[in-house]
Image: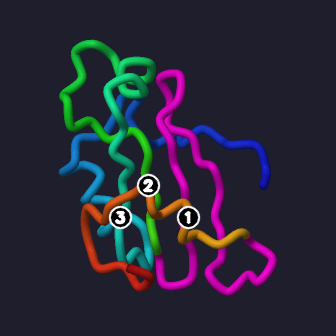
Amino acid sequence: MDEPEPVDDWQHRPFSPAEASALLDDIDDAVAVWVMHHDNDVRSAVVLDDAPEDAVIDIIVETGSTFEMYSYTSGVWMDYGTQRKDDPEAPPMAGTLDSYDVLAGKSETA
């Protein structure tokens, strides 16, 4: 996988659940938005003190053919790349998705 790239057109703060859900309409062909629910230790290391308790800092957008991975790191949203669903050489997403819940849409894999 390539080095992560900043997502320049996203805000420089964690998303609210409603903002993360809106990615379902904002990203072409999106069928589901997955979010990771972190424990308080992880959250306190990444999220500012004034952020809401339900702040979203890790997102996977599932499209018809891909998984697009994003993470809020050091005050910036980073794009960690896209994994094609039909790539036989890619690691399976099932293990990764075990740590996530579908926030919006209907996953084709869940």
Give coordinates of residue 100: x percent, y percent.
Answer: 39, 57
Q: Amino acid at mark 2?
A: Ser
Q: Nearer the viewer, residue 22 or 61?
A: 61
Residue 24 among magenta residues = no
The quadrant holding residue 25 is: bottom left
Q: Relative to residue 45, is residue 15 depicted above or below?
A: below
Q: In the displayed structure, does residue 33 sit left or right of residue 28?
A: left
Q: Which residues are magenta?
A: 63-90
Q: At which x and y percent is residue 20?
A: 30, 52
Q: Which residue is mark 3?
A: 33
Q: Residue at x 56, y 64 (%)?
A: 95
Give the residue number, with chain letter if any, for mark 2.
Answer: 99
**Which secondary structure, mark 2?**
loop
Which residue lies under the disc numbered 1? Answer: 95
Which image quarter holds the N terminus?
A: bottom right
**Within the magenta stretch, is there residue 74?**
yes
Q: Between marks 3 and 1, how big is the CA–CA gap?
A: 17 Å
Sequence-first disc among 3 and 2: 3
For marks 3 and 1, give the one nearer the viewer.
1
| SS at mark 1 in the image | helix
CA distance separating discs 2 and 1: 8 Å
Residue found at x 43% / y 52%: 59
Compared across the picture, whether 29 is left or right of 5 comes to: left
Residue at point 26%, 59% (across, down): 22
Q: Is residue 95 above or below residue 46?
A: below
Look at the magenta stretch and give its main secondary structure: strand
Disc ID at residue 63: none
Q: Locate residue 90, reporting x and y percent.
A: 75, 72
- Mark 3 or 2: in front is 2
Q: Residue furthest top?
A: 49
Q: Secondary structure at mark 3?
A: strand
Residue at (36, 27) in percent of width and height: 43
